[in-house]
């Protein structure tokens, strides 16, 4: 029997949340100890040889992967959250969604000028959320050295929006 790949742990749900969409569900990665270990190990391997100081994870699924990566690699972890969720002084950035807009924030003291930063999320789709998070990190003086994703929906062209960054996606799906 061959060794399982990350995509073997991803559940695909057709026509969710609307007809024609193939939803890629990470709860089946999280719910399987081997799938979770494999995914965290592969994310960490993607950073071998990368000089960085801190991992920034995007709410909420970026937390699920970013925190164990930070623990395993002995780095600090910084959360980027939805507006109104962080208790200390923050900066925020609005970005467009398919229907409307959203806003994320980071603590003003979370990133020190000159720190080398890796950002982590479960999925790159259109790239809007990650683009806003990158802008926050750069506004604080952080230097983004890599963006890491478990999955990429190549048909939504998020990589194009983030093309100035080094991007690592463990699994790339061609569609939306």
Image (cartoon, grey):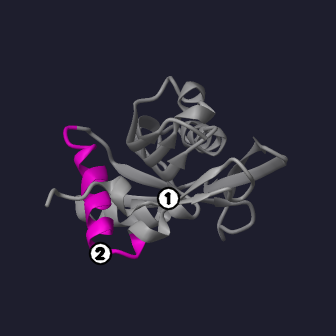
The residues tagged by marks 2 and 1 sit, at their Cα atoms, a distance apart of 18 Å
Write down the quadrant of residue 147 in the picture.
Answer: top left
The quadrant in which the C terminus is found is top right
Secondary element under disc 2, as helix, strand or loop, is helix
> Which one is in front, 90 or 124?
124
Q: Position of residue 110 (x, y in %)?
A: 51, 55
Mark toward the viewer: 2 or 1: 2
Q: Position of residue 170 (x, y in %)?
A: 36, 45
Residue at 44% in and 35% down: 143
Q: Which mark is residue 45?
A: none
> Which one is in front, 172 or 42?
172
Residue at 44% in and 70% down: 28
Asked whether residue 74 is in view, the answer is: no
Look at the image and give the residue range highlighted in magenta. 30-49
Q: Which residue is mark 1?
A: 62
Q: Is 37 a magenta residue? A: yes
Q: Which residue is mark 2?
A: 33
Residue at 50% in and 58% down: 62
């Amino acid at each position: 029997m061959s060794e399982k790949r990350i995509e073997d742990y991803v559940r695909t749900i057709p026509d969710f949340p609307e007809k024609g969409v193939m939803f890629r569900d990470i709860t089946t990665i999280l719910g399987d100890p081997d799938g979770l270990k494999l995914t965290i190990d592969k994310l960490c391997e993607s950073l071998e040889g990368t000089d960085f100081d801190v991992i920034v994870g995007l709410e909420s699924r970026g937390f699920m992967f970013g925190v164990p990566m930070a623990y395993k690699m002995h780095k600090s972890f910084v959360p980027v959250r939805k507006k109104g969720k962080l208790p200390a002084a923050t900066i925020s950035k609005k970005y467009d969604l398919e229907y409307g807009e959203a806003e994320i924030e980071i603590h003003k003291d979370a990133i020190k000028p000159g720190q080398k930063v890796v950002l982590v999320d479960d999925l790159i789709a259109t790239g809007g959320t990650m683009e806003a998070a990158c802008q926050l990190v750069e506004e604080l003086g952080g230097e983004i050295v890599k963006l890491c994703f478990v999955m990429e929906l190549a048909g939504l062209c998020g990589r194009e929006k983030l093309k100035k960054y080094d991007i690592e996606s463990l699994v790339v799906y061609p569609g939306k």
